[in-house]
Amino acid sequence: METTKWALDPMHSEINFKVKHMMIANVSGGFNKFNVDATTEGHDFSKGKINFTAETSSIDTNNEQRDGHLRSADFFDAEKFPHLKFESTSMEKKSDEEYKLNGHLTIKDVTKPVTLNVNFGGIGKDPYGNTKAGFTIDGKINRKDFGLNWNAALEAGGVLVGEELKIHSEIQMAKVQ
């Protein structure tokens, strides 16, 4: 089978997350600088190898003060750990559209196995003749598993930042010619 290489279409992709704030609402954010590449057998992503990296300094929650805190040693320590990365180990096909993406996520030199839910949107050609593949990726991680431990106790009980981080991504890949 022919090996196919895929590159990120950054204009049609986004990496986002949500985390509880004060135990009552969610704060959303994302990474502005990231890359995804894949190698597949033909167009079969279930037999593929997928790699993702994000620049930790590109974290964006629409609040510069909070973003600065997230880049600090309290959280991502962006100067010391400029990237977080995900490397796939397998992609299990559950149906024509549903997959389980297994791999290793590394944040701050802590690597843990994670499983993400993938909805495969399909493959098509754009008006310029480029072959594209689309994916929606969702999952959850515990931020403390990766050394993102900072928190503050609230006067009424509870904590400022939740432990569970919800991941939601829209990814479009372009077949490399």
Image (spheres, rainbow, N blue to C red):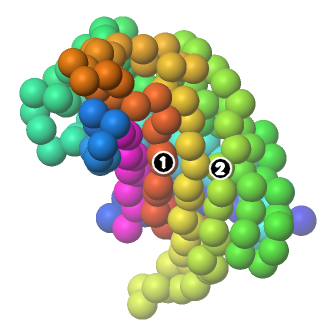
Task: Check the image and report above or below for 69 versus 32.
Answer: above
Left or right of residue 25: residue 7 = right
* Secondary structure of residue under mark 1: strand
Q: According to the image, label 2 marks what residue?
A: 116
**Looking at this view, is 57 or 100 the one in front?**
100
What residue lies at 80% left-to-right and 47% top-to-bottom? 90
Neighbour tally class for label 1: few under 14, some 14-19, many 20 plus, Cα within 10 Å? some
Q: Quadrant of residue 78?
A: top left
Disc 1 to disc 2: CB gap under 8 Å: yes
What residue lies at 60% left-to-right and 31% top-to-bottom? 105
What residue lies at 63% left-to-right and 79% top-to-bottom? 122
**Looking at this view, is 114 or 89 the one in front?**
114
Q: Work out whether residue 136 can be spotted.
A: yes
Q: According to the image, label 1 marks what residue?
A: 167
- Judged by its main secondary structure, the magenta piece is strand
Q: Quadrant of residue 120?
A: bottom right
The segment highlighted magenta reads 12-20
Left or right of residue 118: residue 168 = left
Neighbour tally class for label 2: few under 14, some 14-19, many 20 plus, Cα within 10 Å? some
Q: CA distance from mark 1 to mark 2?
A: 9 Å
What residue lies at 36% left-to-right and 19% top-to-bottom? 76
